[in-house]
Image (spheres, grey):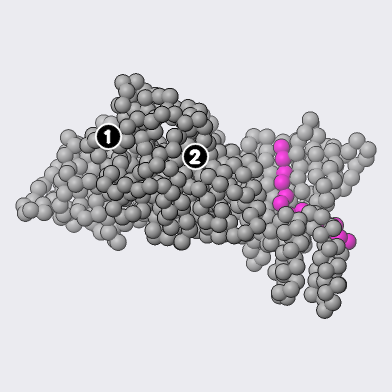
Amino acid sequence: MRPLPLCLILSLATVALSQPVQVQADGPPGEAAHGLHIPQGNRINFNYNMSDGAGFRWDIQYYGTIGQGTNNAFSGCMYLQVNNSGLQPRGAGWVNKAGDEVEIGPFQFNSPVRVFRRIRVYKDLPLARWLDIFENPSGQEQALQIHYHTNTNYTVSETRTSSGGTTFTDKDWAFVTKTTSGGNSPTVLSIVCDPRSKVRPSVQVHSNTVNLRYNIVVPAGKSVILCHFQSQGNSQTQHDKTMKGFRSYRLVKDLAAPVQKTILNFTCARGVEGVDLERSDSEDSVILKRGDTIFGRIQNTGFTLQTLFGELKLKQEDVIGMAAGLGGDTQVRFVLTSGQVVRGQGADLRLSVALGGGGQLDVPIADVSQWSYRISETKPADQPFAAPQAVLRTGDILKFDPAKVRFSFRSRYGLATLRAEDVQSIALDNPGNIVHRCTFVNGTRLGGFLEPARISLALGLGAPLEVDRDLLVQLRFSEEENRPPVLAQVIMNNEDELYGRFVERSFRLATKYNAVDLAMDHVKTMKLEEGQLAVEMWNGTVHRGLPAQLELPFEIAPGTVFKLPTDQIVSVLRPDPLPPEDIRKQVEALVARLGAESYKDRQEASDKLGQLGKGIVPLLQKLAENPDVEVRHRIQEVLDKLGATSAPDNADPNNPFVQGAFFPR
């Protein structure tokens, strides 16, 4: 039986080195593990250098690590430690025929488990992939503590996660590290899991080290894999593009289906979420319930289903494939090219399959576990998100017209009428939590309840559908999160996380000494400490006390304002605190002198700007877009001395909401 291309799961990790332990004899196991290892015909010695599709260097060492990378990005990358034991160096490994992947091993630790490391450097992409294979030939399952450790050659000055934060959380699946290199050392993207993965690492970044840790179990007589990706790049924008286009299944077509299924830290869904289709590049395929596979050409011109919303006639050009119901479910699930999944009754259907060697089979759907058309331009391997979707408990994933949906969200701050363009998703099925979770495009996350109790959806398939909200798992409006880093962040004591701007210009704080009015533009942070708010201002001054107001109005989207109870606020972070007006005028005057004819005047202005301290950074960032090249250069020099960068990423001055959030009005 020919193998089917499938999808895999990947992640990036980094590993610590400890005392080496003796290894077993060279070589992977035999045919029982077919496809798990690279054939050993082409032996290589280390160091072994390869370049990725963007020209970045990956110098592979005998530990299965990277030495320095490009322009000293690393001082040892992807060290592996198992049960507190490191790898013993190996002087040789082997490379595949294409010359883009090497393998080293086996390594053995204080355990029956053997470890092999496969490292692939993509010739057409700015990516490297690690497959760490853990084989357990014993008759008992083995619990392992896995530690990945990377040293950067310079101190990490900035970490940015896939959710836009600075610390890796359970909301993240990747992160970018930038160092303080004095040269052109690249920033590094690490992809460590997918958003829905149940096996996730803990991630710690400190000084010049990055550490990832897992606790895994390898079943008796089985193998499992941890898979990771890294990318070297010249900018955050480049890594954002890589993350946006990242699809794990596209990067694992070289792996056999059984190998892909052993990956722990990615949940690879072929076809569409929840429907796992094993598709071929060359032929249509049918997998029978008894396990046999049939290859050929499916001849059906269409299919008729009885669905939740009535009879549905599907044309073959709109269909990717079909999977049988789970357990005793007699209904089937059709995956469509539009990214939808439709569940219905189709037990009387038959598949007509033209065989490659001649002849035809007519197979009852009742005998089929799944079938799918071959991967092609019109029926691609992935169906990207293209329109809002309703995910139902029945397994249906149905597109709907958001303009025809009327709904609100009731949180502890009141009832808000929602605009579809402001919302990313509403999750109604939260294990262990009866509240619904509304996530906005700007990153705001609220707990509450979707209203009304019954939702009317205008389906893209033509039929209207009115459902009880209890039948909904999720409403998805967008895959993209667009959170300008200039928005204020507020964390509430129920773990709600809001992004936006404070509506009022100031608030009063009753301190130990007297009440003071604090301009919100000047506030950097607020934190609840020992029953009081500790308010840090733009220049580092800290005031402690109780707010006079019971509520602070906060706008999370145009027209959507919540009154936040001040006694429920845990913290506030404003990334763009502005100095008072007299300081702003002084900064603007000094910036104007940066373009003076006299070198002495220009230098004096630069020096005085640096003496004003880090509190002027947000204002300098705003003024950095100066038409004068000399002024821009000198502003950047001052920002560098103050440990900052130029204008904030994603700051769109044409967006009135963003404008109101960080430009003084």
Q: Nearer the viewer, residue 265 or 369?
A: 265
Q: Seen from this angle, which residue lies furthest left?
A: 359
Asked if residue 270 is among those painted magenta in the image, a careful observer would answer no
Q: Which mark is residue 79?
A: 2
**Does residue 603 show up?**
yes
**Does residue 388 show up?**
no
Question: What residue is rendered at 62% in x and 49% in y?
Answer: 154
What is the crowding at mark 2: few (fewer than 14 residues within 10 Å), some, or many (at least 20)? many
- Work out whether 316 lies above or below 208: below
Q: Nearer the viewer, residue 89 or 264?
A: 89
Task: List x then y, in percent, for residue 162.
Answer: 54, 48
- Work out whether 22 lies above or below 190: above
Task: List x then y, in percent, for residue 550.
Answer: 78, 39
- Disc 1 element: loop
Q: Seen from this angle, which residue lies furthest top?
A: 140
Question: Which amino acid, mark 2?
Answer: Tyr
What is the crowding at mark 1: few (fewer than 14 residues within 10 Å), some, or many (at least 20)? few
Horizontal side of 507 relative to 264 (left or right) equals: right
N-terminal-most mark, 1 or 2: 1
Asked if marks 1 and 2 touch (Cβ < 8 Å), the reply is no
- Work out whether 293 lies above or below 611: above
**Count of number-bearing discs:** 2
Task: List x then y, in percent, for residue 428.
Answer: 49, 39
Question: What residue is rendered at 51% in x and 45% in y?
Answer: 77
Question: Which amino acid, mark 1?
Answer: Pro
Which residue is tagged 1?
A: 29
Question: What residue is rendered at 47% in x and 31% in y?
Answer: 20
Range covered by the magenta-colored residues: 570-584
Q: Seen from this angle, which residue lies furthest bottom?
A: 597
Q: Nearer the viewer, residue 589 or 134?
A: 134
- Disc 2 element: strand
Q: Nearer the viewer, residue 276 or 646?
A: 646
